[in-house]
Image (cartoon, grey):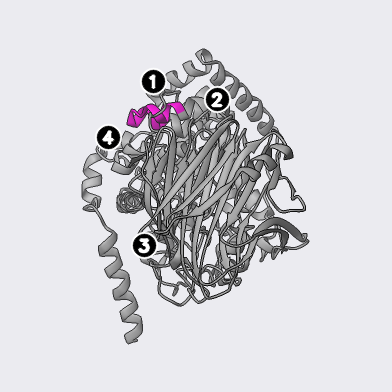
């Protein structure tokens, strides 16, 4: 009993720490909302319909979207509604059988489309059919995903600010998505429905979503996980559902207020430069819900409460996605995220319009324009903000220690170098990737980590770190006698926020950029005693990496890269040639002792039915240390062919002066590149020179 009380006290203490602003009370929220509400009122009112209709006439893209919606609506009018849900598979992440949830999603999507068409046309046939589809969504027993129920999720390692002792799993982000859609259906066909029909949807929203959290927030793990995207999803879904029901249940204003408060606290955890710990893919969810929950709040409270005025959202509406852009259409993919750029046109048009950000407008116009294809693009028009790119093209995201270096946001003939340090404190979507890096050129990523982990039954448990996608074995990092990096969180043990690494210095310059990191604390430090990694982007296309390693004596050291495409290794191991679809990259490594390149493959089979064995290639630069201190320099640059790669390799010179400083030089494309690292008490540091400045 004493231990349990201590655990509850610890949660209360954490809550006091993370709450950064006074919470909005239900009374305050209630006073900001009109006493009389007439449906529709969430995203638009009856008075706004003529403007929406005008967009479908005057804007060619909106006209095309609306034509497709009408065609879809016509088909749905004659579609027989499936009234019996498929049997829910107990282990969908293993079997791949998601038919139960696809059934729910398919029906609410149909109901939503028809409800929108009812608002746009006023034709009752759309409302009538919309309710038929909504009715079967109300009829299923629950809206959460089976993979998020007790049998599977119980062993998950819980994220920052959440104890592992969790037992309640009856509301998840899929519940929130369904509640959001059903709230809009309720709002949009409200005036067509009779009391019984309204109560059918109202009852489902209460039973399957709202009442599972109202008064019970602290029993749901995600409600305190402010560095996790689930807070934004789950809180927004409950909040919007409650907003939709205020005409019948005004007391639900407490859920509206509490949802707002929790999403606000989630936004507090956005980094000081706009970075998000879970990576670029999951950052999209944060900004999407800032719009999808923030805009109705703004409408209903006349601007008094809107998530879009959170300082982190207002200052950095697209910073993370813009500065992690890999031209023309990929993005930095550290952690559980894909490499394809994120396109949510309506979301980014709103962000640009609400914040006045020229960068958000550029992102909406140049990255998201091709994504204008949904009813949201009719509801939220193209921003009127003039688009522009920032003068400073690179960024150090200091809170999460990502660094992206570039010469241009758009020129694919230049190299984008991205690298990271950071803490190992995200057991859900983080990887053990302190020191990982990638090189993008001509629209291809030549060096990168493996990327997104398959979401099978075990991928969020402690076993996660045995997966090459998540463990350091699948990252472009250093290994001493095979010692791997370690997580900062194991199930049943407290979070250790010291595990991981730090960016010690970052310099921005028009001609050259430099980053120095220390990744020592990412390891157990039994074999590897100290590790400092230096990155240089010699603009526009040369990358230089220097590793300083202290280890046990005479250790085997491996520096790993995961190349994309074919790799050629000459007999003398003087270089690697990475062959892309649009060009080639040479990798040239020199060290304090002789090296050789050793290609190998990870063998991986996901915990999924009929999963195939995957063989994932990588190349290690191997050497045997002489003593306890080792330096490895790695040069990466575009070359036409193997002959050019060999010529550059033969020109490399490496020297160490009497004071312990190191100088590296080589010739490429008629230029000599020279880098001098001065010796200091802590290790080497790139000497200051013209064209570089501290940032």
Element under disc 3 = loop
Q: Which mark is residue 644?
A: none
- Residue 618 in sight from this viewpoint: yes
Q: Residue 480 location, x and y as percent?
A: 57, 69
Q: Marks 3 and 1, Cα distance to the nearest angstrom?
A: 47 Å
Q: Marks 4 and 3, Cα distance to the nearest angstrom?
A: 52 Å
Q: Which residue is mark 3?
A: 682
In the rendered structure, the answer to whether residue 643 lies left or right of residue 430 reads right
Q: Marks 3 and 2, Cα distance to the nearest angstrom?
A: 74 Å
Q: Residue 109 location, x and y as percent?
A: 59, 40
Q: Which residue is mark 2?
A: 123
Q: Quadrant of residue 380?
A: top left
Instruction: Inspect the magenta stretch and tell me whether residue 136 lies in it.
Output: no
Q: Marks 4 and 2, Cα distance to the nearest angstrom?
A: 32 Å
- Residue 276 in sight from this viewpoint: no
Q: Nearer the viewer, mark 4 or mark 1?
A: 1
Q: Nearer the viewer, mark 3 or mark 1?
A: 3
Q: Which residue is mark 4?
A: 303
Element under disc 1 = loop
Q: Marks 1 and 2, Cα distance to the nearest angstrom?
A: 38 Å
In the rendered structure, the answer to whether residue 584 lies left or right of residue 310 reads right
Magenta stretch?
350-362
Contact (CB < 8 A) between labels 1 and 2?
A: no
Element under disc 2 = loop
Q: Residue 31 location, x and y as percent?
A: 21, 43
Element under disc 4 = loop
Q: Residue at x 52, y 39 (%)?
A: 673
Query: Which of the two residues, 353 or 99, is positioned nearer the viewer here?
Result: 353
């Amino acid at each position: 009993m004493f231990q349990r009380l201590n655990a509850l006290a610890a949660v209360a203490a954490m809550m006091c720490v993370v709450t950064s602003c006074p919470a909005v009370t239900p009374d305050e929220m209630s006073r900001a909302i009109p006493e009389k509400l007439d449906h529709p009122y969430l995203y638009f009112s009856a008075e706004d319909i003529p403007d929406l209709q005008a967009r479908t006439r005057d804007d060619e893209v909106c006209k095309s979207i609306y034509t497709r919606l009408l065609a879809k609506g016509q088909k749905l009018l004659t579609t027989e509604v499936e009234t019996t849900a498929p049997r829910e598979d107990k282990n969908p992440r293993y079997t791949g059988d998601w038919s139960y949830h696809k059934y729910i999603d398919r029906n609410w999507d149909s109901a939503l489309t028809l409800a929108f068409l009812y608002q746009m046309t006023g034709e009752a046939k759309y409302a009538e059919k919309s309710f038929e589809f909504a009715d079967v969504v109300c009829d299923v027993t629950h809206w959460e995903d089976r993979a998020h129920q007790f049998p599977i999720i119980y062993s998950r390692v819980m994220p920052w600010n959440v104890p592992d002792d969790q037992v309640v799993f009856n509301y998840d982000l899929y519940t929130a998505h369904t509640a959001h859609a059903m709230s809009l259906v309720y709002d949009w066909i409200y005036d067509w429905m009779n009391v019984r029909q309204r109560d059918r949807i109202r009852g489902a929203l209460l039973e399957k979503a709202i009442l599972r959290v109202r008064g019970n927030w602290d029993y749901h793990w995600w409600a305190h996980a402010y560095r996790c995207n689930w807070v934004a999803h789950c809180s927004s879904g409950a909040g919007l559902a409650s907003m939709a029901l205020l005409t019948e249940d005004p007391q639900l204003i407490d859920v509206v207020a509490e949802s707002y408060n929790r999403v606000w606290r989630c936004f507090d955890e956005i980094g000081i430069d706009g970075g998000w710990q879970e990576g670029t893919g999951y950052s999209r969810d944060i900004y999407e819900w800032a719009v999808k929950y923030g805009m109705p709040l703004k409408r209903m409270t006349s601007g008094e409460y809107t998530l879009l005025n959170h300082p982190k959202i207002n200052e950095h509406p697209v910073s993370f996605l813009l500065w992690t852009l890999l031209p023309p259409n990929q993005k930095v993919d550290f952690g559980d995220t894909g490499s394809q750029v994120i396109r949510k046109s309506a979301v980014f048009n709103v962000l640009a319009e609400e914040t006045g950000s020229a960068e958000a407008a550029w992102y909406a116009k140049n990255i998201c324009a091709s994504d204008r294809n949904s009813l949201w693009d009719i509801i939220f028009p193209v921003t009127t903000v003039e688009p522009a790119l920032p003068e400073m093209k690179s960024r150090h995201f200091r809170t999460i220690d990502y660094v992206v270096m570039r010469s241009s946001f758009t020129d694919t003939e230049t190299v984008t170098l991205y690298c990271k340090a950071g803490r190992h404190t995200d057991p859900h979507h983080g990887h053990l990737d302190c020191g990982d890096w990638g090189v993008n050129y001509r629209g291809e990523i030549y060096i990168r980590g493996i990327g997104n982990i398959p979401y099978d039954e075990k991928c969020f448990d402690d076993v996660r770190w045995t997966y090459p996608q998540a463990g350091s074995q699948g990252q472009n990092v250093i290994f001493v006698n095979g010692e791997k990096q370690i997580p900062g969180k194991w199930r049943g043990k407290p979070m250790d926020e010291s595990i991981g690494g730090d960016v010690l210095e970052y310099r921005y310059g028009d001609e050259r950029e430099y980053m120095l990191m220390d990744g020592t604390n990412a390891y157990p430090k039994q074999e590897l005693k100290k590790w400092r990694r230096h990155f240089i982007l010699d603009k526009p296309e040369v990358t230089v990496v220097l590793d300083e390693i202290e280890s046990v004596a005479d250790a085997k050291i491996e520096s790993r890269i995961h190349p994309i495409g074919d790799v050629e290794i000459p007999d003398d191991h003087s270089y690697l040639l990475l062959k892309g679809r649009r060009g080639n990259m040479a990798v040239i490594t020199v060290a304090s002792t002789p090296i050789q390149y050793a290609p190998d493959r990870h063998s991986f089979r996901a915990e999924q039915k009929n999963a195939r064995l995957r063989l994932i290639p990588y190349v290690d630069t191997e050497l045997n240390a002489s003593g306890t201190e080792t330096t490895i320099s790695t040069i990466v640059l575009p070359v036409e062919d193997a002959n050019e790669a060999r010529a550059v390799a033969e020109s490399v010179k490496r020297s160490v002066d009497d004071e312990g400083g190191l100088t590296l030089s080589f010739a490429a494309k008629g230029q000599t590149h020279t880098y001098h690292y001065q010796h200091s008490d802590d290790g080497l540091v790139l000497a200051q020179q013209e064209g570089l400045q501290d940032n």
